[in-house]
Image (tube, rainbow, N blue to C red):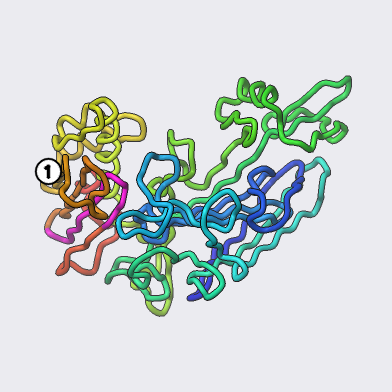
Amino acid sequence: MRWDSSWLYVGAELRDRFVWANLTGHNLVAPYHDNDFEVFIDPSGSSHWYKEFEMSARNATYDVLWGVPDQWGLLCSPNASELLPVCVNTSFPGYPGSWSMAPAMQTATYTPSWKEYGNHGWSLEVRFPMHPGDKHGGLLDGLTNTHRFDPAQGDRLPGLPQYWWIDFARAEHPRAYIAEGGREVLCPLNCSDGLERATPVLSNPSTLQCAAAAAGWPTLLGSDTFYGCYWEWVWQSLGSEAYMHRPQLWGMLQFVDPTTSSRGALCRNIEFPGRHVAESLFLAERSYAAEHNGSFSESVAELKQFCDGGCDREVFVVLEAVPGVFGVDVIVTANATVLSAGCVSRPCFSVRVNVELPGGEHSYAVSMTSNHMVQVMHFPGSEPVPCLGSAPDSLLG
């Protein structure tokens, strides 16, 4: 990756024993139906207004602006609203809207071998526009106070670099080969020797082939007759979560400008512990609501009993062990008089995690709504903001 004030540049090399793709064009058919490369970017770290990009070996591309994490039961609006973000905005048919980073976005692919079995692979380059223009969107679209998240504006605070949340994925479908005697072999995992002499099947696997592959490889995802089955190879693991649209689980990208950045080397984000605590409380609230007819709880002790799935039970151990570092407030509003961006439904809840580094070195607060809007406030008077690795060990539990 590289960047300047106008562009984010991404290049990738993908290893593939058999390079083949059928789709072309931009926002016509999702490149996922071939094997593809995917980029997910959340510039604000709020989990709202993130961008998805897909690309195939024949340079078919697709981009979408998502208002909230997809397929998670969160609230959004089909149109612009002061209360809710737009659910989805893209020029891709089948979804509403007209947003796209094209034509400013530039993409290219290269493969040394096409439709030939062997250790070949393909490579790609993408140039994403940072800012929207008159005829195209940009990575910073949808955000208020855009300058806060623009890496060209320098550090977010003294000592606190500009971070974006980002992840890379590769969707890869099993491919069937017809070997000698009509024997069918599925790749790319555990491929048999001699497949260079076999006949590849260029179409994606059938439902029966997907079931056969899943029986041998339990990490295979999907079985839908339209989307098929696939492996999702990712840069930053999502743990037990099998869907890429979870920005809070992506990796972090730190921007460095030698002329303006106070951190010229890696600086792990001091916000991570507070964000992680807030996320686990959010997930516990969702589990609690599922068993209590949609209601929420203000009791951290009660929520501890509903920490499952992606919720980290160690969070509750740390909260009890170091109460001077983490202060938690959970507020439930059963029937708000007026809905707002902080309370978009009845009932609603909000979580606030106050983090005080031992010795008063620095303090900040993470807030998260029941619609998974994440915001962080750093309190003045304790700059420069320390890196996570330089904070006292007790902060990490």
Q: Which residues are magenta?
A: 360-375
Say whether residue 293 is magenta.
no
x, y percent for residue 186: 73, 28
In this rendering, is residue 348 above or below 183? below
Q: Is residue 282 above or below residue 101?
A: above
Q: Is residue 330 visible?
A: no
- Tell me the quarter of the image containing the C terminus: top left
Q: Residue at x 21, y 46 (%)?
A: 350
What residue occupies the far bottom of the structure in this picture?
259
Residue drawn where x is 36% and y is 43% of the image: 74
Q: Nearer the viewer, residue 173 or 333?
A: 333
Residue on which the image places disc 1: 323
- Rendered image quadrant of residue 364: bottom left
Where is 298 relative to 381, above or below? above
Callout count = 1
Quadrant of res 50: bottom left
Q: Position of residue 237 (x, y in %)?
A: 47, 42
Q: Secondary structure at mark 1?
A: loop
Residue type at numbered disc 1: Pro
What residue is at 55 percent from the left and 69 percent from the top? 136
Residue 241 screen position, x and y as percent:
44, 36
Question: Relative to residue 27, is residue 72 drawn left or right?
Answer: left
- Residue 334: x %, y % from top left: 16, 40
Q: Quadrant of the N terminus?
A: bottom right
